[in-house]
Amino acid sequence: MSEQEWAELEVESKYENLEVIGEFISKTMRGFGVKENKDIFDVQLSVDEACTNIIEHAYTGIENGKIWIKCKISESKKEFTVKIIDTGKAFNPNSIQTPDTKAELEDRKAGGLGIFFMKQKMQSIKYAFEEKQNIITMKKFLT
């Protein structure tokens, strides 16, 4: 794969496809020459969390929803970009408050940790809603 090409995957928004997505991320990153397992894990975790949110929230009650994932690496091979696109309900991950990770377990609100982990693992996360599509663009600086 050349650095300028986008590797692409289209799947139905079903939990059983999370494994397919994780394998796609790993295979794509290795195909682009990424060797650091921590970088691959960080991207896999972030994409898994984003796709889980899409399945749970964007496509709630919607049959046959699709998720499109596009990946590329910079020419310098120092930055990996992932775009995740869906046509479900509009959702801005930036609207979710950062969870209080220091609070006692029984005092914590349910949910919100997935986005928290994504923000910890990726260097940037941008959200857009364009032409009836949610588009999340995440970038990871590679070690």
Image (cartoon, rainbow, N blue to C red):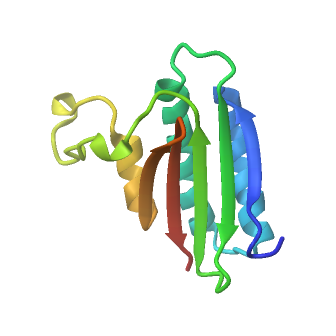
47 relative position to 118: left or right: right
For the question of whether residue 44 can be seen, the reply is no
* Residue furthest right in the image: 1
Q: 132 or 111, which lies in front?
A: 132
| Residue 92 or residue 29, whichever sits in front | 92
**Which residue lies at the image location 54% right of the left edge and 40% below the top edge?**
131
Residue 92 place in picture, x, y as percent:
37, 41
Q: Which of the 4 image quadrants contains residue 33?
A: bottom right
Q: Quadrant of the N terminus?
A: bottom right
**Is residue 17 left or right of 60 when viewed as pictured?**
right
Residue visible at 56% across and 49% down in the picture: 47
Question: Up-down: is 55 above or below 62?
Answer: below
Residue 93 makes an appearance in the image = yes
Q: Name the residue at the front extreme.
A: 131
Would you identify the image quadrant in which residue 10 lies? Answer: top right
Residue 65: x percent and y percent? 65, 25
Give the residue displayed 46% in from the left and 63% down from the top: 122
User: Looking at the figure, which quarter contains the C terminus?
Assistant: bottom right
Between 94 and 113, the residue placed more toward the observer is: 94
Number of marks drawn:
0
Residue 136 in the image, given as x and y percentages of width and height: 50, 50
Q: Residue at x 56, y 76 (%)?
A: 142
Identify whether 25 is placed above or below 86: below
